[in-house]
Structure formats: C-alpha cells, structure tokens
C-alpha cells in the first residue's frame, strides 16, 4: 500500500485534517495519473494554508479522478453533530440581506436617508457578483448609508458546523447552521472531471415524506428554509472555489445546482422559487436556468408552478412502476398516484417545448433495491411507462445508512437493468455513488443531534 503524492502534499501543507484515510492502493492507472488544471489549482490553494491564518479559512476540495463504484467504508460518526459552547456569535437579530429579492431590497432601503434610485442595484451586485461578506466592503456606497445599513442588516451565510471532504472522490459535505440551534442542513459539493462541479442543496430542515430508502425521511420535519438559507448553500462553496467575484465568461467551478438535498422543494415553493430567481438573475449570480434542477418525490400539482419559471430542469423520484410498491416505498404516492404524476409530467414537457432541450427532458430517478424493485420485468415496465414522455432515467445504487433495511442491487445486475431500458428506447445513466465515505451520497443526508445543551 502506498500513499498518492497528493496526500503527501496535503499533509505537508497542514491540511491532513481533510483526510479521513490517507491510504490509496497504487495501481497501474494511478501510476500514470496526472492532475487536472482544476486539481493543480487546489493543490496550490492547500499550500497557502500554511499561513498563520489557517483557522479562519475554509478548506478546498479537489477534482475527482474516477466515477467507478468502488467499495468504501461508511463512517457512522459523521451522522451525528456534536454542538458545543464554541459556536460563534452572529448578527442573528439583524435582517439578512442575502435572500431578499431586488424589489424587497428596494423596499428596505426606503427607510434609509441618502439612498439613490441606483443604490439598490449597487448593493445587489456587491452581494451576488462581488460576493462581499460584510457591508463595509461595498466600496462605492457612501459611508453614512453603510453605517445605517450596519445597524439594521447583515450579510450572513450561516455557520459551517462541520466540513468533510472524501479522500476517495473529493465529494465535500457541509453542515450549515442558521439562527435557531437545531436549524442545520447538509449540503454537498460533487466535483466533476475538469473545472466544474455540482452543488446539492437542501430546501427543508428534515422531511415529511418518509421515503423508506432515504435517510432524510427518518428525520422529522423541523421547518422550511428561507430563500437566504437556500442561497447560502451556494454562496459558501462559490466563494471557497473562486467563483466570486464573478468573472465574465469564466468557467464556474460550482457549475450546476440540484435541489436534491434534504426536504421536498415543492413543499417550500415560495422560498425555493425566490432563491431560483435570485440565482438566475442576470444582474446578480446569473446561473443559467438549464444548470438548475429541482427534484420532487411526486408533488404533481407543483409541476405547473415550476413550469412558470421556464427552463428549470425537472427530476422525478419515481423508484417504482406500480402503485402497490410505490405506496410502500414513496408514501406520497398515496396522494398523487403514478397515473396522476405521469399526466403532470406530460403537461410539464409540453410547456417546456419553447425552452432549452435539457428542460424539455425529464429525469426519472430510480434507486436500485435488491429484490424489491430491480427485476428485469420492472425494467421493461419502466421503459413502457416513460415511452411517451421525453425522459432520461438515472439508476441509483442504494447507498447504505445506519439502520437501513435495504441492500443495493449488484453492480452487474444494475448494468443489465440499464441495458434493457436503453434497448427499449429510453436513455439511461447509472449514477454510481459519490461521497459514500462521508455519508454524502444520494439518500444518505440527515442531521441528528446529541443530547448536549444547544447554545447560540
């Protein structure tokens, strides 16, 4: 067994705390492996952490070199949050500028003297194009206005309670806390090959849907996240990876956003909608709509609302082809059965015909549960169900979590299942696990608390 040279560089730069296991098997492939430009950039960033200000800087992740489904050991301790009295004090009592729409910002500024008609636009660009973390960094705003803003408002992304980077594939799982002590959510950055990656965002603290294969489903719904709390899950990695300040026509490192974290986005639609509108505003963050995906467990009436935004990609957590099984593993099916959901999907696809091609195509997610929903008969039924809808199937090997009752279908069986669907005319991708060793893979997110005293 030998350590990859990357780990050696990380260790000498004082970042060995990012590595839960520093041992990687040296194979013929890794002997000839060369880091991408994105990875070389992050190796350089690691070196900068040697300064005395290490504790104030958040660690960066690195590019993945493989999408193979390699077995990794799950650390169950990553599923529990230990809170202490060291939690930093924030300006929780001030109104957060992050998450306000431009119209709301203009309304807030009406009570501040000296504000011009263009001041709101200036502040907006400082927030979302420059990515400033304090009001004092808004250099061309008059001091008198900044002083008054500081009395009432703050720029707050929440607090990073824990930060885990997988040494296996570079997936980074953040636990972000907000004003109320138990309002914590997990958010995951998934690096891709090259200078880009996907941020998986949560929309609720907990979830009410209780899907039996999903770890979040075992966590009681605490509350909806605000628009600001949703956007903060993007802002933290965007600042960390150099996307902010924005550079025109530059490749974003956080290039995609998926609402596939904790919670049901369509049950928090008002805040999710406002967050998407801020993320896609051309005078702000400017994320292309085609780079944002909203995943739902099947809230059929909500699809029409999503269609009104025009161009956002849709993913459906399907996981079964008949109501009997889906009622059991995705209980919301009892309210919106498969035929109702499919009708809503067909209507959504029609409304998206004037939008980009990616938005017209609906992604159907299907977790592979051994001896539950993985028969080849199910594969043929799935292809038949989606025949008349522009669709793409994502097959997801089940990712284990403590106390789960399921086992993933074997790798070869998943490949065979996928080929049947493909041969029947439905494009299919196998989404091999990422972030298993930090409990950051699909279906593994959950925030639990020990019984220590919770403090601000």
Image (cartoon, grey):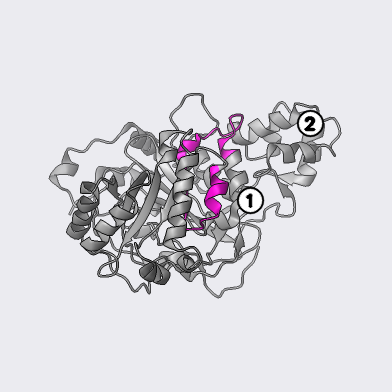
Q: Nearer the viewer, mark 2 or mark 1?
A: 1
Dot 2: element: helix
In front of the other: 101 or 187:
101
**Residue 33 in the image, given as x and y percentages of width and height:** 21, 38
Dot 1: element: helix
> Is 35 displayed left or right of 390 in the figure?
left
In front of the other: 317 or 425:
425
**At 47% across and 64% down in the image, what residue appears?**
446
Q: Quadrant of the C terminus?
A: bottom right
Residue 143's mark?
Answer: 2
**Residue 91 in the image, given as x and y percentages of width and height:** 71, 51
Please name the residue that numbered disc 1 is placed on: 270
**At 52% across and 59% down in the image, what residue appears?**
263
Mark pair 2, 1: CA separation: 34 Å
Question: What range is drawn magenta here?
Answer: 278-307
Residue 40's mark?
Answer: none
């Amino acid at each position: 067994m030998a350590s990859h040279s990357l780990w050696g560089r990380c260790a000498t730069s004082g970042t060995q705390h990012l590595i839960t296991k520093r041992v990687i098997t040296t194979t013929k492939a890794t002997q000839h492996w060369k880091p991408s430009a994105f990875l070389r950039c992050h190796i350089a960033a690691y070196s900068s952490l040697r300064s005395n200000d290490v504790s104030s800087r958040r660690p960066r992740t690195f590019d993945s070199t493989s999408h193979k489904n390699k077995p990794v050991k799950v650390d169950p301790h990553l599923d529990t949050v230990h809170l202490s009295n060291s939690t930093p004090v924030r300006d929780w009592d001030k109104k957060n500028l992050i998450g306000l729409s431009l119209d709301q910002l203009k309304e807030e500024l009406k009570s501040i003297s000296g504000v011009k008609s263009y001041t709101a636009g200036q502040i907006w660009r400082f927030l979302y194009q420059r990515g400033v973390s304090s009001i004092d960094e808004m250099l061309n705003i008059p001091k008198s206005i900044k002083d008054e803003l500081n009395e009432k408002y703050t720029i707050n992304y929440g607090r990073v309670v824990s930060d885990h980077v997988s040494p296996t594939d570079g997936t980074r799982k953040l636990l972000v806390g907000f004003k109320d002590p138990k309002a914590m959510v997990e958010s995951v950055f998934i690096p891709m090959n090259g200078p880009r990656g996907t941020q998986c965002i949560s929309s609720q603290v907990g979830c009410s849907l209780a899907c039996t294969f999903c770890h979040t489903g075992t966590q009681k719904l605490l509350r909806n996240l605000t628009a600001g709390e949703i956007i903060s899950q993007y802002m933290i990695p965007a600042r960390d990876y150099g996307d902010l300040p924005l550079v025109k026509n530059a490749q974003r490192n956080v290039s995609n956003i998926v609402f596939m974290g904790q919670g049901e986005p369509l049950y928090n639609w008002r805040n999710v909608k406002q967050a998407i509108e801020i993320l896609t505003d051309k005078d702000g963050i400017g994320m292309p709509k085609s780079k944002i995906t909203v995943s739902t467990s099947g809230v059929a009436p909500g699809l029409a609302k999503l269609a009104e935004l025009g161009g956002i990609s849709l993913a459906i957590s399907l996981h079964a082809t008949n109501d009997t099984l889906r009622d059991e593993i995705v209980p919301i099916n009892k309210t919106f059965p498969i035929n109702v959901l499919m009708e809503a999907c067909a209507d959504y696809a029609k409304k998206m015909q004037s939008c980009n091609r990616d938005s017209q195509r609906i992604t159907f997610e299907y977790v592979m549960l051994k001896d539950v929903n993985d028969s080849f008969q199910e594969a043929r039924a799935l292809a038949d169900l989606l025949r008349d809808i522009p669709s793409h199937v994502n097959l997801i090997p089940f990712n284990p979590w403590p106390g789960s009752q399921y086992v993933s279908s074997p790798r070869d069986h998943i490949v065979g299942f996928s080929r049947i669907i493909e041969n029947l005319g439905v494009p299919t991708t196998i989404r091999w696990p990422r972030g298993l060793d930090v409990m950051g893979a699909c279906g593994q997110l959950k925030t639990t608390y020990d019984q220590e005293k919770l403090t601000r």
